[in-house]
Image (tube, rainbow, N blue to C red):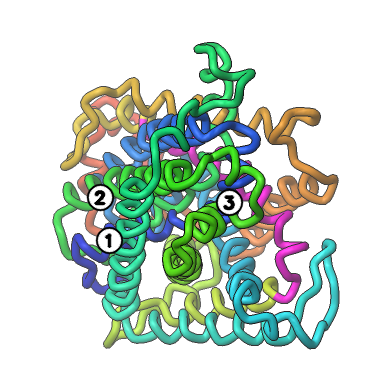
Amino acid sequence: MAELKKTLGAGTLIALGAAGVIGSSFLYLSSAFFSDFGAGGVILGMIGATFLAACVALAISELTAAFPRAGGEFVYAFAAFNRPVGFLVGWIAIGIYVGIVAFYVTAAGFLLAQVVPNMESIPLYAIGGETVYLPVLALGVVLMLIMLGLNWFGAQLAFSAQLILFLVMVGLGAIIVVVGFGHGESSNFFPAFAPESQNVTGALISSTKFILPALGFLTGFSIVAVMAEEAKISPKKVGSIVIFAVIVAGAFYAIIFAATAWVIPWTKTAGLQAGTIDAFREAGFAPLAMAAFVIGVLGIVTTFLAVFSAVSRLLFSLSRAGMLPRFLSAVDPKYGVPRNALLFTAAAGLAMGWIGPGGLTWFLNTGGVNLAFMWIFTVAAFYQLRRTHPHLSRPYRVRQTWLPALGGAAGVILVVVSLVPGTPLSLGSVGEYVIVLAWPLFGFLLYWLTKKPADPEDSLRLLLGDYYHKFRNSEPVQLRATESAETEPRQR
């Protein structure tokens, strides 16, 4: 049975989870956010979103500690429900992450164009209102090859680089925060809401409205779960890191937003173009404006690396369970990484990346809906396994079992407001609705065409490895007896 090599320590897993969440767009969008929600609404809304994401992270933490296998939510859905549901969740996760990988093929070049105008030369074509330039696309190809190279020689190399970049990003963020609060004034921040929202009701409404878009900035913490098989620390610690990663990322966002609102009047920042970057430039701290820009660049690289790795492990996991072609589960004997899955990830990212950010925005927008679906299935798996396998070994155990339900409820709300036309977060085009429907249909076509083990139990055995017998032995005796009676005729 193909097994991945255990090389990841606690520090690299934290960097993987937190840096996989922290991107770059929040630095630019703080202007629009302050204008729409007020500084107070943005900060309180981010705190609320972090709490809800942490509720989902609780469920993932317990499940990751119980099943520290590559695949994350795919593994839990299969174990809790059945093979088709597991495949659906895994395929949705692949869709989310492949869209992000493809987006970053051109996103880095477009960000760099802010300081290197020559990046936007030699136009090739325009899709979705965005022109794709040759230097931008070339940089994306180079970055993709770097991601492939870092992963090619083992997870330890890739995520040692991730840890270093994450520490640099946190260090620059700390300098921005210290200067922002040290040289800014409270009068720049207060009143923290627009005049029409300065009463309790208005402040609550502004903060609540920002929670939904803020949840989109917290995607990626479950990558820790996807990579859990490669952790060389205890399953309990891996579970704890899932929660820690989302809290670190949410706190990073909230503190940077607060420093931005403190250094100059947030109402002035609301009228600027590049949010945090322009705010510190206006305050007379040009080097810190550049530091904020560097954070954005590092955010792209670290998220790119984390998501690229996650896609390959998801492909590997589905293949190992017999739900995708077998060649994707081949593991290099020396470095312990799924090289075929890595090559396939790079090829898929490059194939989609040429579309450019104008077209790929559709995939990112639908990714938010798919993420909400994953949250719902994951929380459901948490409660289902609590019911059907009460004696399952759970090295990390959630004490307040009602908390994950809040995260699941947030997922339901996200799905509703995204799919129902006319809400502030509705999908913006017919094409996006088509993608939401077409991706799972395409997945099940592939699922149907792939030769799978005749018995779903064999798929589960391959997926869980050494944890399979622990899983089955944790079932109540009555349930085991029922399943034995059902399978006995087939065994004869």
Q: Which mark is residue 13?
A: 1
Residue shown at 34% from the left, 51% from the top:
177
Q: Are marks 2 and 1 in contact (CB under 8 Å)?
A: yes
* Element assignment for label 2: helix
Say which quarter of the image contains residue 484: top left
Query: Foreground: 311 or 176?
Result: 176
Q: Are marks 2 and 3 in contact (CB under 8 Å)?
A: no
- Which portion, as a residue range, is magenta? 354-382
Query: How many other residues sit within 10 Å of disc 1, few (<14), some (14-19) or many (≥20)?
Result: many
Q: Amino acid at mark 1?
A: Leu
* Element assignment for label 3: helix
Residue named by callout 2 = 241
Q: Amino acid at mark 2?
A: Ile
Q: Amino acid at mark 3?
A: Ile
Residue named by callout 3 = 92
Q: Please identify, in this view, whether the residue under mark 3 or under mark 1 is nearer the observer.
A: 1
Looking at the rendered image, the quarter that the N terminus falls into is bottom left
Which of disc 1 and disc 2 is earlier in sequence? Answer: 1
Q: Are marks 3 and 1 in contact (CB under 8 Å)?
A: no
Q: Which mark is residue 481?
A: none
